[in-house]
Amino acid sequence: MSIDVKMAWRNIWRNPRRTILTICAIAFSSLLLVFMLSFQFGSYETMINTSVKIQSGHLQVQAEDYQDKKTIRLVVPNPAAVGKILEKIPHVQAYTFRGQAFSLVSSKDRTYGAVVTGIDPIREIQVSRLKKLIRQGSFLAESDSDQALVGKLLARNLRLELGDELTLLGQGRDGSIAATVVTVKGIYSSGIDEFDRSAIQIPLKTFQNVYTMDDAVHEVVIIGKSLSDIAEIKHSIELNLSTLDPQKPLKTLDWEELMPGLRQGIEMDLVSGMIFYFLLILVVAFSILNTFLMAIFERTREFGVLMAIGTAPARLTKVLLIESMTMTMIGIFAGILMGSMITLYFQTHGIDFSGASELLSQFGISGRMHPKLSVLSAVSGPLAVFMITFFAALYPALKVRRMRPVEAMRAV
Amino acid sequence: MYLQFAWRNIWRNTRRTTVILVAVIIGIWSMILLGALMRGIAEGMIKNGISTLTGHLQIHHKGYRSDPAIEHSITDPQVVEHALNKVLPSGALWASRVRVNAVASNARHSSGVTMVGIEPSSEANVSFIGAAVYQGRYLTQQDQNGILVGEALLDKFETKIGRKLVLMSQDTKGEIASRAFRILGVFRAEMEATEKQFVFVTRKASQIMLQLDTGISEVSVMLPGKPDNPNAISELKAALPQDQFEVHSWRELLPFQTAYLRILDGFIWIWYLVVFVAMGFGIVNTTLMAVFERIREFGLLKALGMKPWWILREVLTESFLLLVTGMIIGNILAFLSIYILSRIGIDLSAFAAGAEYAGMSRIIYPAIEVKDIIMANGVVMLLGLLVSAYPATKAARFIPVKALAHT
């Protein structure tokens, strides 16, 4: 160990009380940042995964413009060919086909408008959580034809019970009138009111018959193995699609394009989080700057003596920086360690937010939230603390250089 | 005397004092500013919710809230009108509406909407629609076939002013009633969802279409002064037959916003504590050092016969003065920044869809609430003194002889 490091280390522990308080301040802010960032990331992942697993999927292949217009005529004409492409892409976990048409839905004494979705009962299970959300009755089976799943709020509005009949009336792909009668087989509740109020699921085969779709569908819904694979999957789908049918271009959309509100909501939350962290780090920085400055004022005489016996100012600065950075590093590591431990605890046990469940269910979050520790969430906050303390330490360390030995030695 | 003593002591070391002051000022400033921003978001959300066809309170036929169907209409609105005239304070405004789910369609598109039948003149006083039409014109009593649609709906339907739009809904007999309307005006709303959801026709037109006669779905009331008025609600409840009507405040009508308000106080508290802890370490450390630096001085004072309690009081008084000075400046700065921000607003248009997803308005104006200010200052003062007590007791416990010998 060089003499400078040894000196710095001994200097730190000359006033253990001050050192410990400073380290505590740094550790506290690092800990808080690790936990808060993990918490934010965790809730985003929950939000994305719930919305993705209920509604959009990670990716969809649609006809161009379908996303904006939702017109029944804009179809994916040959879903089997798209399926073949998807089979070959390694990161694709599962995919399914859906058809969608806005229709008038009537029960015995009520009529509402709703989106009728044709789903493939077998494939849908691998892509969406719909089956797990069934509260009454059961999910569609492969052999079902005139059966339907209805959202809880829509069922209440229509005064529907299991086994009741439901008339669907809409427009087919060729412009003809599409009408059929289905029986309610299951009632589900996703917690997202808008979805539960406006959706009906029927088997895809029935949907294609009723709405004269032939073999066409509107959406090919894809789930990737993990969120981070999405960009890659999207790229390889796009490459393969272009070879398919150049006359009717198909488009690949990822979840950010499918649910722009969700993405922007996350961005906005990140920005407001940044403001929060910025203010916090600012307060911490002043707290630390304070301590560093004071420590130096107190030791004015010491520096005077050191300079008088021939210590170069640069060396003083170096020792001071080693001192403050050692304290910072100890604090940051303690903070990361404790923060990670606390985060991991809540990651497995969850934090109870049942008091706000009404609010959170609209974002697809159930009463418990799980923070998610990642390298990014564990390191980025403390890194910001490190940088700001470095600058806080720089000022007093440079200030020392301007001291004059004689005056400094006289200082009280 | 000793206030003066303390004040002079503080300024003996200007540098140190300034550094602590800056920490306190930034702490207080950030507490109040962030609190005001969060309040502002909540206020915007509530204002928006109230003006989007909610009002401060609403009267419905019994059962309408849980099942908003046409058979739960108010068949004799005179009873309600009468009660409103009798009970409500002067200056209260109200509007009665027909509100049913319907399907809107034109040649190319169809979609589910909420058809709202309004009394054009009274509605303008109560909800956003009176001032929201930006193209075409607002409805008048005589417009039997006119309809107002939102900008987003207009785009989705690829249509424009003067074109036809057909509404279909269930009438009182349980039959499907449909009627063609002509688009008279286009409105803009804070949320795109509102533009997509609501279409407005005159009350008369909707009553004819649905065979409602003079029936209505709801009465929405705006009270003068504060939105919360439990008296008005209980008096209205008493004045109306219990078995026929239900009265709800906006808090019940907007569960999402109410839930947000409920957790907001908790958030603000947590923020205050977090800032304080970060700031607290600085305060303890600096005060502690200041005390040790003056170890000889305290020793001398004690040797001259000052009681430990006096020294404790002396150090606490110094902290108190520092905190007060920091708080005054911090508050002034916070008010200044809030004032500036509330003039220009914080524009979230870049995140419009995100703001909408979170139910927030596009422009946020910070809002000051007295209890937040009191709480922020209270937290800093109370905890500030509490943490200074540690160095103060240290100072009080110095042993005179040792302290005097200290260099």
Image (cartoon, coloured by chain):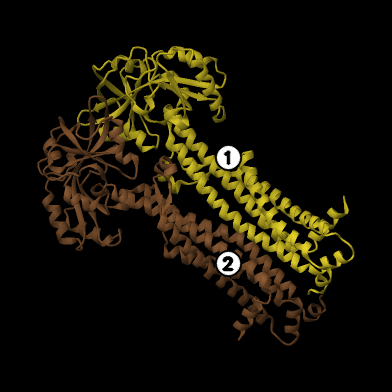
Q: SS for tag 1?
A: loop
**C-alpha distance separating marks 1 and 2:** 32 Å
Tell which residue pokes out farthest to the right in this image.
Answer: A309
Which amino acid type corresponds to the residue marked 1 in the rendered image?
A: Lys
Question: What chain is the brown one?
Answer: B
Find chain A in the image and tell me its colour.
yellow
Tell whether A390 sits left or right of A275: right
Q: SS for tag 2?
A: helix
Relative vertical location of residue B176 with respect to residue B147 in this rendering, above or below: above
**Residue named by callout 1:** A372
Determine which quarter of the picture holds residue B204.
top left
How far across and down, in percent of the image, does residue A184 sit?
A: 30, 25
The residue positioned 19% from the left and 61% from the top of the image is: B88
Quarter of the N terminus of chain B within the rendering: bottom right
Relative vertical location of residue B30 with respect to residue B120 in this rendering, above or below: below
Determine which quarter of the picture holds residue A118.
top left
The residue positioned 68% from the left and 57% from the top of the image is: A392
**Residue named by callout 2:** B383
Relative vertical location of residue B393 with respect to residue B336 in this rendering, above or below: below
For disc 1, the neighbor class at 10 Å (few under 14, some 14 to 19, many from 20) is many
Which amino acid type corresponds to the residue marked 2 in the rendered image?
A: Leu
Q: Chain of mark 1?
A: A
Query: Relative to the observer, which residue lies in front, B129 or A38?
Result: B129
Query: Relative to the observer, which residue lies in front, A17 or A302?
Result: A302
Determine which quarter of the picture holds residue A287.
bottom right
